[in-house]
Image (cartoon, grey):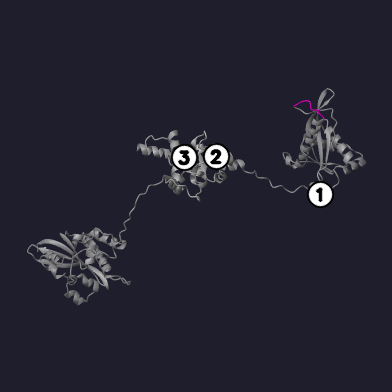
Amino acid sequence: MDVQTTQIHVFSDASLKGYGACCYLRQVGKDGTVHTMLLFGKSRVAPLKPVTIPRLKRRAAVIAVRISKLVNRELKLSFDEMYFWCDSQIVLGYMANESKIFHMYVANMIHEIYQNSSPSQWHYVKSKDNPADMASRGASVDELINLSWLSGPDFLKEHDVKAYMEANNVNRKIEEHDPKVKPVKVLKTSAAALNIAHKFLKYSTFNGLVKSLAILQKAARKKTWKSVSATAEDMQETEVLAIKRTQEINFQEEIQTLKENKSVRKDSTIATLNPYLDKQSILRVGGRLHRADITTDEKCPMIVLMYSHLAKLLVRHHHHRIHHLGRRSTLAATREAGYWIISGASTVKSTISDCIACSKLRKLLQEQLMGDLPAERVQRTSLFSHVGMDVFGPYHVRERRSTLKHYGLIFMFLYSSAVHIKMLDDLSTDSFINALRCLTAIRGHVTTLYSGNATNFVGAKNLFDRELERVSDPKMQKYLLDYRITFKNNTPESSHQEGAWERLIRSAKAVLNGMAINYKERIDSQTLKLHSMKWQAY
Ligand SMILES: [Zn+2]
């Protein structure tokens, strides 16, 4: 047979038992003979979970296009035409749809069908003419042989298939309330006038805010961003604009009332300020200084809401400008600049408390936790047994025509803080030993001496040790050993260990200096000179 046209016809159908599709080759000879045969069939059992028939029919349609793809790929024959047949008007409606949006599951299926076929290839077939019906319901062997499963439906054997198509043309519109169609939401938006003050929160400095605003305004006027920079005049203009925009948000009701030439409500936060709107519609403090010979900003400052972001920026700006002065100065600087912040004192207080520089400058120093006092300071012993000592001075003392340097030597009894002061002619070891002898003669035996690391004290200890070594008389040695004075040098570079008697030196000096002035013996303005003064304090 000479073949004139070769066509592929794919049928799909579904029932509650299952769904499937089958594919037929149709060849028309030049002599008009028609030959049809089954190429491929496929069926699936319906899911256990009950689903609707239209849904199964959609899945059958998907199988139909997959079969067509397979046949196309495997058969390696050139086909003139390919037809898809389906007995569901709903599925055909989905294929023909161009405007509605489906839910995701249906949309994915339709997408796959569209990828492998075009809507014009899909046609309606009556259920009785649909051979895929057997794939969906199942059939016995006899039925398979007798019925149209193997050879295809009768209308395929006719010469003109298109006549069947035209006779069975159906409406392919989707119903208005099809549950598979996704409802479309239409959102209507309207643009309202935007107050730029909402953007101020992004700025942490007042200058940064004003500068950005100035550049933005200038760029808007020029309608370009190229070579736009802010001048001092722009900054001044924008500063006022920033206040105005903020006021429009914070004092909306008050501004509206004043525009209507009415008084603001008595419970308003700014009622006591007697506010008014100036020519630029900026809310200012009324006050009683209208006749004063000062600038308007000073007479009638602009009102700023307490704790607002702009108020904080303003306070921070002026606080930095006056180099971190205190609350009063910062508040005064803000008012001088022409801003009246409501509850300004507390706004300034909270802003300064957040200022890192101020917290560094005014922070209380941390103090060392003091350790326990040494036993000598708190255990009762005989008078002047444990003694701390130190040298202070020099004092310039005039003897006849010469001026000599003299020093004071302070002994402090560690338990009771009793003080004994001796005068040292110089800082030699001999001089110190003399003073120590005097102390022991008057006050009694000293067992332990605490001192700093002054050279004369270290020398005395060495001398004592040497003298003791020289003593050969056992009685004398026993006596000295019995009355031996133990020297304890404090740790080098740790003057705090001598704090107790260092403090008494200060008191002793104050008394001595006072005595010298009382005696009107002060001659030189630079140095204190005591005229042959023989002093001894107890
Ligand atoms: Zn500060």
Secondary structure, mark 3, is helix
Q: Which mark is residue 208?
A: 3
**Residue indicated by mark 2:** 319
Q: Is residue 404 left or right of residue 120?
A: right
Which numbered mark, 3 or 1, is in the foreground of this view? 3
Label 3 with label 2: CB-CB less than 8 Å = no
Mark 1–mark 2 Cα distance, whole angstroms, equals 55 Å
Q: Which of marks 1 and 2 is nearer the N terminus?
A: 2
Q: Where is residue 355 in the image (x, y as percent from the top left)?
A: 56, 43
- Image quarter for residue 356? top right
Q: What residue type is labelled 1?
A: Gln
* Ligand 1 closer than 8 Å to label 2 CB: yes
**Residue indicated by mark 1:** 379
Crowd around label 3: few <14 · some 14–19 · many ≥20 (10 Å) = few
Q: Is the magenta stretch mostly helix, strand or loop?
A: loop
For the N terminus, the quadrant is bottom left
- Image quarter for residue 513? top right
Residue 249 appears in the picture as rendered: no
- Magenta range is 519-525
